[in-house]
Amino acid sequence: MKKKDINRVNNINIKDIKDPYFVRTLSYKQLDILADDIRKEIIKETSINGGHLSSNLGVVELTIALHRHFDFQKDKVVFDVGHQSYTHKILTGRSLERLRKSDGVSGFQKMDESNYDCFEAGHSSTSISAAYGFAVARDLSNDNYNCVAVIGDGSIVNGLSFEALNDIPHSNHKVIIIINDNEMSISKPTGGLGVVFAKLSASKGYLNSKKRYTNSLSKTKFGRFIFKITRTIKNWISAILVPHNFFNDLGYYYIGPVNGHNFKSLDKALKEAIKTPKSVILHVNTIKGKGYAPAENDEIGTWHGVAPFDIETSLPKNDHHLTKSWSKIFADFVFDKMKDDERTVVISPATLKGSELEKVFEQYPNRSFDVGISEEHAFVMASSLSLCSYHPIIAIYSTFMQRSFDEISHDLARMNINSTILVDRSGFVGEDGETHQGIYDESFLINTPNIVLTMPSNVTEANLLFNESFNNRGPFFIRFPRNYVSNPKVDKNVNISFRKWILKKKSESNNIVILAIGPLQNELLKLINDNNVDASFYNCLYLKPYDEQALIDCLKYKNIVIYNPYSTKGGFASFISTKLIEYGYKGITHIYSISDEFIKQGTILEQLEKYHLTPEQIIDDIKKI
């Protein structure tokens, strides 16, 4: 390689890239240098801003190769989940400097960011269906562009992916599906005569000859008979020479496995995928976390999604050594319960690391189940386990639980199945933005029969609610936020009766009563006391069933303030407002909950301030009542 060629690549400032077309002019050695530069940029910016690190490091070469063969201002590419799109953003002129900040780019594909983004997703397994929809629209409009789905081996096991995989081969609407396999081999490489036959079956001469042969024989009845016989013989020979896999049997043309970090191999495979006449599976092997040793060696997902960290030491920059996350608090409860009760089982839908259940799974492997990205399966599985006298605990993020609404209603609640559901990341989640906010589950849960819905304000209440969930209460949901607790100790002297609210403060008048939900109420109550505000204060840790007597006692107040910064107004606030109307309440109801909209990225504090939900903002309003 000439020195001037090296300088040509080295002089490319990642932040000055405006469009991806230059990658088509680079040699393979230049492309390797570019990939290395992009990796360094991704590592640097995620170390500052946090984000999805390992998945993006694994698809650098693949993404560059895609831009060498497709024009994604016309062609369509859908990165599954979208958390693999950082290289795509860089190549299409977007800086990662303010990644996931309110004034920066999203951590996912975003249509209003760039005309190179044709779709958006924060949940997995939507890419194949989306790409197929684009392909159908293309063909109905007699248009001409390629439709590409890039999906990981973890995402493809989701039921939605299988629905799309099953549907596509029955049509003539071609889709290119790229499986980013960074964990396990989906099929074995073909060898010997199989390799020769596979190459022959994808060659231009073969495809043209096949087309002419089919057209000529299809003109007569006898010709169609001959074609049927010869096709049967060809398929028989193919079955002997070419080892088929699941995708072949579904009706796809299969290419791979291909080295996802070798540009020459990727170029060859993509050219082949483009010229195949039917939908194709391109199986690419990559190394998740490639280029950053801690991420490459990670076997439990520590480096999948990261908070800001120090590149040299790989240690997180945030100092939480004196605190404990809500996830860890409940993971400890689960561990103790698994130790004491052999008929307790735990289920995680691919959120094992995020829910901090590693210790549980290590100690109790026979009763711990990571079902992968299969949320619906998790709830149905839990239902039958419970019917066999086991008590299932499902630890799941609020945003992912949305996908299980039918199973929660039909299979869990309808049969009143005893179970404990730990709803992690409830409320604002910050930088992951619209797709990951945990603010919508409360609305559908509170309106589903048989469900117990709760949210503690401290660790003691969390422990009491967790223990109560094992007392034959049916589906028992405990919501908790993405946050840390400075005092994670449990007070064993506290008791709370089922469905009862806690009266934290009794006013001397009947002017104001506050009905509050979740941990932020502690700060609000402190401000109430510090400012000598004359108001009664209830901790409504049971959202459903609600404390009917306590609510009736509230009817005497002129003003009822409902404070729930962890859900939209369609949740507890709407539910209680309806009850107040039924009781004939004549006073004024003041609702402080999240607006019924999709919340954009930013810090949790920024989101609270924007929607007028910080305790400081609430106390200012209460003073004016």
Image (tube, rainbow, N blue to C red):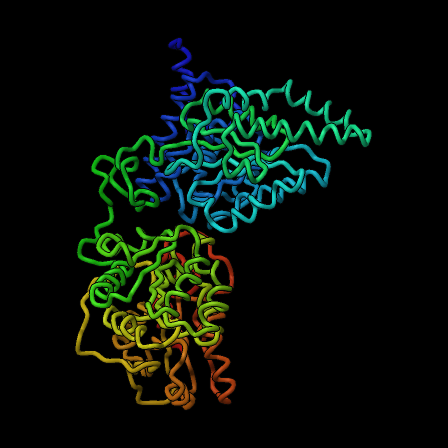
Q: Is residue 62 above or below residue 54?
A: above
Asked whether the viewer can see residue 23, the reply is yes
Please name whichever residue, 345 or 510, is drawn nearer the observer in this view of the structure.
Answer: 345
Instruction: Name the foreground residue: 367 vs 413.
Output: 367
Residue 299 higher or lower than 600, as above or below: above
* Residue drawn at 70 percent across, 25 percent down: 211
160 in relation to 311, above or below: below
Residue 407 drawn above or below residue 288: below
**Residue beneath the point at 51% across and 33% down:** 244
Side (left or right) of 549 relative to 334:
right
Looking at the rendering, which quadrant does residue 361 occupy?
Answer: bottom left
In the image, farthest residue toward the right:
220
Task: For the C terminus, give its image quadrant.
Answer: bottom left
Q: Residue at 29% across / 33% down in the picture?
A: 292
Residue 445 lies in what quarter of the image? bottom left
With 23 as the anchor, is 96 left or right in this view? Answer: left
Q: Write the residue at 17% across / 75% down.
A: 492
Question: Going by the image, does 206 lie left or right of 54?
Answer: right
Residue 323 is situated, as x and y percent measured from the top left of the image, at 21, 58
Q: Position of residue 357 (x, y in %)?
A: 27, 55
Q: Nearer the viewer, residue 145 or 161?
A: 161
In the image, taking residue 624 as reference, residue 319 lies left or right, namely left
Q: Position of residue 227 (x, y in %)?
A: 72, 29
Q: Specify the quadrant that holds the N terminus.
A: top left
Q: How many marks?
A: 0
Visible residue check, residue 116: no
Corner quadrant of residue 52: top left
Question: Where's residue 46, x and y in %?
Answer: 34, 40
